[in-house]
Amino acid sequence: MQATVDLGRGIEMRARGGTQLALTILACFLSVGAYLLVAFGKTGRSPAGVGGFVATIVVAYLLTHVLTTWLAPGGDPVLFPAAAVLAGLGYAMIFRLDSSLAGEQLAWILVGLGAFAVTLLIVRDHRSLDAYTYTIGLLGLGFLLLPIAPAVGETINGARLWIHFGPIRFQPSEIAKVMIVIFLASYLAARKELLAVATRRVGPLRLPEPRYLGPLLVAWVVSLVVLFIEKDLGSSLLFFGIFVVMLWAATGRASYLVLGLVLFVIGAILGYVAFAHVQDRVLIWLHALDPKYVDAKGYQLAQSEFAMATGGIGGTGLGQGHPGLIPFASTDFIFSAIGEELGLFGSVALLLLYLALATRGLRAALAREDAFSKLLAAGLTSVLALQTFIIVGGVTRLIPLTGITLPFVSYGGSSLVANFVLLALLIRVSAPPPRHAPLPTPRGAT
């Protein structure tokens, strides 16, 4: 009987590996094709060094595929190829918008793939992370606090998000989001029964004992205060959304969603009252296309709207539009640039790739039996889904613009590397755990 089970498991793993190989090859074609179409559309000829780029992308993607099937056999075959297509399309659009940034973005893609492989190599069993609940939580909080430090913190465009060590500059909040998800998954897995038992009534809501909510509420308040000091409202919304989603996933109680909405409204009001730039964001959101604002404060968002309207259903074609008219198009507004040149069809295809990442991540959560694995997969998936919703909703005026990157697509190394680490952990959770893996150390150990 055991031999039959092992045989079936081996066949399934080989099938998944073959599926991932086919999808990775498709990702190579799509990434290279987008780059070539952008170059031809922009200059009318093949770009210099195209052979080197093609070789780099193909070798990097195929080597990452081999490492994934070796280090995480049986992992979800869709996750890496979907992210690879997003990264390739992002590179093509960054080359389209500012070719001087393309070389740096390609280097960050390679660094991100390296971080992806290192994560799979080090974390052979994701359940081992459950033994370092508070250590990982404190490290995550430390990364959030780093930009406040006067010696290394740096303010750019009014937000204190960056730290620098010599020529190296990055956003530590990108690393913090992964660590905070691991902390929340471990903490909630250990206390989900206590949190699910409602013994206190607050109006129409029934909540557990305050002492069980205390550490999570303290973590939320500290994160919110730090992020408000750093004036990074996008990350503030992202972290709070992760907190609420994971708490709801752990307990299944809708009262936490209601409580989260109340806390969000309170935080939004405080942010609106305290910061002039928040008031400007709301004003621009409501009146970006008004004649009074379209050439002033609302110029960036108005150009985003005009670009997507110009793209229409089928788009102007890669390299044929004018996305450079949008300020900061390679970072905050890259979705608008894609919308102009690939149109509604291309934009929907892009969103479907994120939908594939989200559904496969949630599928991995449902497939695992232990609470930590379920919550870790759900939390990591929520990061990608919420981050995509926040930035796409902002540039399409569904919600006020918060200035956050589009995962795997926007220009920037911090987000790219952190998201590849996140993806590696998600693939690790989706893979069957090692048959003879030792039991994890009890939660809370350091």
Image (cartoon, rainbow, N blue to C red):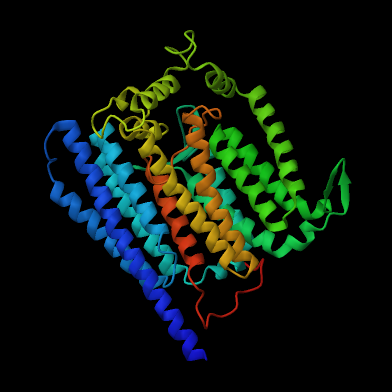
Q: Nearer the viewer, residue 159 or 105?
A: 105
Q: Nearer the viewer, residue 242 or 227?
A: 242
Residue shown at the point (22%, 37%) measured from the top left: 38
Instruction: Please tell me in which quadrant of the rendered image residue 36 appears.
Output: top left
**Residue 173, percent from left and from top:** 51, 45
**Seen in the image, is 200 located left or right of residue 238?**
right
**Residue 330, percent from left and from top:** 35, 34
- Image quadrant in which the C terminus is located: bottom right
**Seen in the image, is 426 located left or right of residue 216?**
left
Q: Nearer the viewer, residue 352 or 127?
A: 352
Does residue 286 show up? yes
Q: For the image shown, how many numbered marks are present on the structure?
A: 0
Residue shown at the point (56%, 80%) measured from the top left: 438
**Residue 356, percent from left and from top:** 45, 52
Which residue sits furthest front?
313
**Seen in the image, is 291 located left or right of residue 438?**
left
**Residue 184, percent from left and from top:** 63, 56
